[in-house]
Amino acid sequence: MERCSVSVVYRPNVRNPLSFMRESQSFTPDFPFPTFSVTIPRMRRLLPILCLTFAVLLGSAGEGWSADLTKGMDAAQRGDYATALREWKPLAEQGNTRARFYLGVMYDKGRGVPQDYKTAEKWYRLSAEQGDAGAQFNLGVMYERGRGVPEDYKTAEKWYRLAAEQGDADAQFNLGVIYANGDGDGVPQDNVRAHM
């Protein structure tokens, strides 16, 4: 038989599939399995680099939002609303639901920014449309009380219901109050639904 040089020989039914990998072995094949060449030394150096690069990129994507949200929350708890605004605004503009909610609260309460119900409603709505129960509840309050928006019990009922369906207890309570009282214009009194 002819001698050949290979890096890897395929052998089925080997208990440790990597145990047969050797660098530049010379041998005489005495079995009918196919042989092929793979450059092991380069792969050994390249694979850890690729794995590490992938892990860093994957990890940093989610952590960037989380870290900035955390920095903003820490700043807001210290009363440093300028830093909180600086951390949250870019995230909110990129679509981060919690950052949008936090900006809504800042504008609603006038913390670090002039109180502006219209801007608060904008950020709450963007967050609420992404399914944030807190933003849905706060929009319900705004519509029920007419803060920055026309007083509209039907719209308030919609936002309370969406938050209540996610288990928000305050929204469930306010929804019950709306049904118990009714408004005569869009949400009729309904004692059965009020007690659900």
Image (cartoon, grey):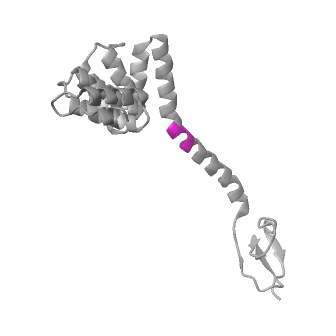
In the current view of this chain or complex, which residue is farthest to the front? 191
**Residue 23, image quadrant:** bottom right
Residue at 81 percent across and 86 percent down: it is 2
Q: Is residue 57 above or below residue 81?
A: below
Q: Is the stretch drawn in magenta largely helix, strand or loop?
A: helix
Q: Nearer the viewer, residue 94 or 194?
A: 194
**Residue 114, image quadrant:** top left
Residue 67 position, x and y percent, is 52, 29
In the current view of this chain or complex, which residue is farthest to the top? 79
Q: Is residue 104 above or below residue 27?
A: above
Q: How many marks?
A: 0
Which stretch is magenta? 57-62
Q: Is residue 171 visible?
A: yes
Residue at 48 percent across and 27 percent down: it is 68
Q: Is residue 167 left or right of residue 182?
A: right
Residue 123 magenta-highlighted: no
**Residue 151, image quadrant:** top left
Q: Nearer the viewer, residue 143 or 3?
A: 143
Q: Is residue 178 left or right of residue 169?
A: left
Q: Is residue 91 visible?
A: no
Residue at 47 percent across and 33 percent down: it is 65
Q: Nearer the viewer, residue 86 or 184?
A: 184
Question: Which image quarter holds the C terminus?
Answer: top left
Residue 155 position, x and y percent, is 23, 33
Q: Is residue 124 left or right of residue 81?
A: left
Question: Which image quarter holds the N terminus?
Answer: bottom right
In the current view of this chain or complex, which residue is farthest to the left? 185
Residue 106 position, x and y percent, is 35, 18
